[in-house]
Amino acid sequence: MNNQMRHLRSELGWSQADLAERLGVSRQTVNAIETGRYDPSLPLAFKIAKVFEQPIESIFEAPMD
């Protein structure tokens, strides 16, 4: 799944560890989501949207096949 997390995080000046702390997950989880190796659960996706104060659709985008 494509996402804008790295871009949004860097705009705020947050490290992966900073974002992980806000989300209650590990830094490795944030890295895996940002690099597309892991798709977040729906509850985590909504939490990410809330942290960034963005609609979930503006953060996550399904790949085009």
Image: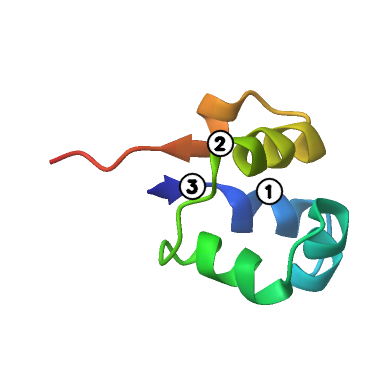
Residue extending furthest toward the left: 65
Q: Secondary structure at mark 2?
A: helix
Viewer-side label of 1, 3: 3
Q: Amino acid at mark 1?
A: Leu
The numbered disc on residue 42 is: 2
Report the side of 53 relative to 65 (left or right): right
Q: CA distance from mark 2 to mark 1?
A: 19 Å
User: Residue, x 59% and y 71% (percent of image)?
Assistant: 31
The residue at the point 72 percent across, 73 percent down is 27
Residue at 42% from the left image edge and 61% from the top image edge:
36
Which residue is denoted by mark 3 in the rendering?
A: 3
Q: Quadrant of the C terminus?
A: top left
Q: Is residue 17 left or right of residue 40?
A: right
Q: Classify residue 10 by image quadrant.
A: bottom right
Spatial CA distance of label 2 from label 3 is 14 Å
Q: Looking at the rendered structure, which numbered label has been put on residue 8?
A: 1
Q: Secondary structure at mark 3?
A: strand
**In the depicted structure, whether residue 65 falls above or below residue 28:** above
Percent x, y of residue 46: 66, 33
Tell me if residue 25 comes above or below residue 5 in the rendering: below
Q: Which of the two discs, 2 and 3, labels the residue nearer the N terminus?
A: 3
Task: Identify the residue shown where x is 80% and y is 40%.
Answer: 51
Determine which quarter of the picture holds residue 30.
Answer: bottom right
Inspect the image, locate mark 3, and give the three-letter code of the amino acid beneath it.
Asn
Give the spatial CA distance, label 1 vs label 3: 10 Å
